[in-house]
Amino acid sequence: MENSVSKQNKRRDWALIARFTKGSRLSFLTALLCSALVALADMLSPQIIRAAVDNALGGLPADYPKPVMVLVSRLGGFEYLGEHIWIMALGLLIVALIRAGSQYAFRLCNTLAAEGFVKSMRDSLFSHIERLPFSWHMKHRTGDIIQRCTSDIDTVKNFISEQMSSVFRIIVLLALSIAFMLSMNPKLTAIVMIPVPVIIVMSFVFHSRIGRDFLACDENEGILSDMAQENLTGVRVVRAFGKERYERDRFEAQNKYYTGLWMKLARPLSVYWSVGDILSGVMILLSVVFGSKMCIEGTLSSGEFLAFISYSTMMVWPVRMLGRMIAEMSKAGVSLGRVAYIMSCQEERPSEKALTPPLDGDICFENVSFGYEDGAPILKNVSFTIKSGTTLGILGGTGSGKSTVALLLDKLYELAPGQGRITIGGVDIRDISTPYLRQNIGMVLQEPFLFSRSIAENIAIAEPGAGPDRIRQAAAAACLEETIEGFSRGYDTFVGERGVTLSGGQKQRVAIARVLVGSKPIMIFDDSLSAVDTETDAKIRAELEKRFGTASIVLISHRISTLSKADMIIVLDKGRIAEAGSHEQLKAAGGIYGQICRLQSGAEEGGI
Ligand SMILES: Nc1ncnc2c1ncn2[C@@H]1O[C@H](COP(=O)(O)OP(=O)(O)OP(=O)(O)O)[C@@H](O)[C@H]1O
Ligand SMILES: [Mg+2]
């Protein structure tokens, strides 16, 4: 079972590579061809030297393939070449130039292909992530997603641009060297090749063993940078609680562990490289010892001897790299799997009917029950109606499900079949086009988020076409005008790391202005006035009433004064509607609302 899943995953990963190499296949093929040409050029130089030594200078009879013999006779024959040895030197130069040209074309095509591959992969990954459901984002760590989009993609890119082509070149080089050596002397070839399988197997076993340690190093490096990043973003908490020492100790402990992992690797790595050196030395030694012996016996010519030494020296590095490359490819496989996982996650499903009805009708929650994935039920049989153009206030304890109501109305989470329905103007929101629905609902989330852009851009984020006047009006309605005019660059002031830092209340007001820029038929304010003082709260509410008499509004708050003007208020208690009615009715009923009312009016009178 597990095997078939992993097979399926492998197929999925390769399908991904095939998909993203689509536009750059020709470049890849050209790169591979050039790579093979480089390897061929590497093979030719020892052959020219061999011919120069044996046939041109040594006068030995020549027995080369026909095209070579034709070329030599066109050039005047070996005797002539021996007298004009510079022609053979020129041959070496031409081969070197061909090699350099092929190498240049290889690098160019390979880089173009790899960059094209990685660009299309990054683009698709980003747009795919943008389309993944809200619930997916809630479930996955942002740091992890970023790592998959950056360093994992880089590893895959290395695999495509370096490892794949290197393995190809190494295999071509090995095959050609063996073929050339066999054509000269099969016996000596067999002797020289003895250490090759040993080196490859050793290198492969070593790297696949040590691969796990490399992975541990990678993971621990991730933990270390996560720690640093968390400390930088949470610097206020660290300072406010005087936790610098604790955090430093934690970092130092992790750093020590991470360094220890590399130290542990130092010994096996040194052993591996030294043993590899010895085996490579043995390979060259074998060609020297047995080659010279055969030379003396007369079964090998001096030119062949020289060529053998060249080939065996040339083979040492690729042979040693092959095992390492193959092991590193498995690392790339892990990264590819991590990227492919994101790509395989289901995007938000578009609604089948994709209706676009007017959204200014009554909003009805009919027996809505909802629980987050694998969690306890959060909303239990919730039913209420927001009459068109009226305001619904929602009060309730922490975790009672208020924000969940807002998220469900915006279709950020979908209701399971049979768990009730939400309708707007009588149409089930499941049948309404999701982008259309969201465009028509202005929502101020409980935790406002501002982008590192100008204040004007932040306000106009949902309405890119909004001119300065509309932005200004929205800022005025959110009681933000004075604050913005206080900044030297006004609406062009940058927010965030490169600009001003706004207070919690100011941030909330920018988020409110963002919604007020467009005139949406439905607006949701999730605890959006919690960080503003009661006076500003009252002003903003008055503005809302004045401007948006026709919109249906959901106002979520812990503050009775914010909710008291709402046409209807529901009190949520552990996911159920405990009370519903107008402010006066609920106050008179003396239930939860009445109690909170008394507590809060007492607090206000007491000056809290
Ligand atoms: N993405 C989520 N995954 C799982 N459980 C969640 C998720 N979001 C909220 N919950 C749980 O659902 C319950 C209701 O959360 P919700 O945010 O709706 O409460 P709330 O009434 O808005 O609270 P508050 O007044 O603190 O904002 C809580 O118990 C919370 O732990
Ligand atoms: Mg909430």
Image (cartoon, rainbow, N blue to C red):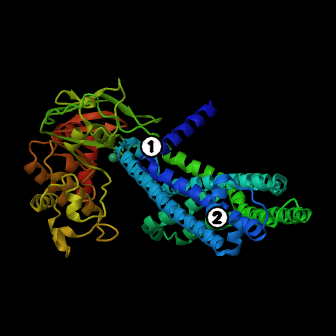
Element carrying mark 2: helix
The correct choice, above or below, for 412 with respect to 561 in the image is: above
Label 1 neighbour load within 10 Å: few <14, some 14-19, many 20+ = few
Q: Quadrant of residue 322?
A: bottom right
The correct choice, above or below, for 116 with respect to 238 in the image is: above
Type of amino acid at the residue the image marks with label 1: Arg
Q: Is residue 98 left or right of residue 532?
A: right
Q: Is residue 197 left or right of residue 573?
A: right
In depth, the one of 297 and 256 nearer the eye is 297
- First in sequence: mark 2 vs mark 1: 1
Circle 2 sits on which residue? Answer: 258
In depth, the one of 13 and 84 nearer the eye is 84
Circle 1 sits on which residue? Answer: 19
Quarter holding the N terminus is top right
> Residue 521, position in %: x, y?
14, 41
Pointers 2 and 1 in contact (C-beta within 8 Å) = no
Label drawn at residue 162: none
> Residue 142, position in %: x, y?
44, 53
| Residue 148 visible, this angle | no
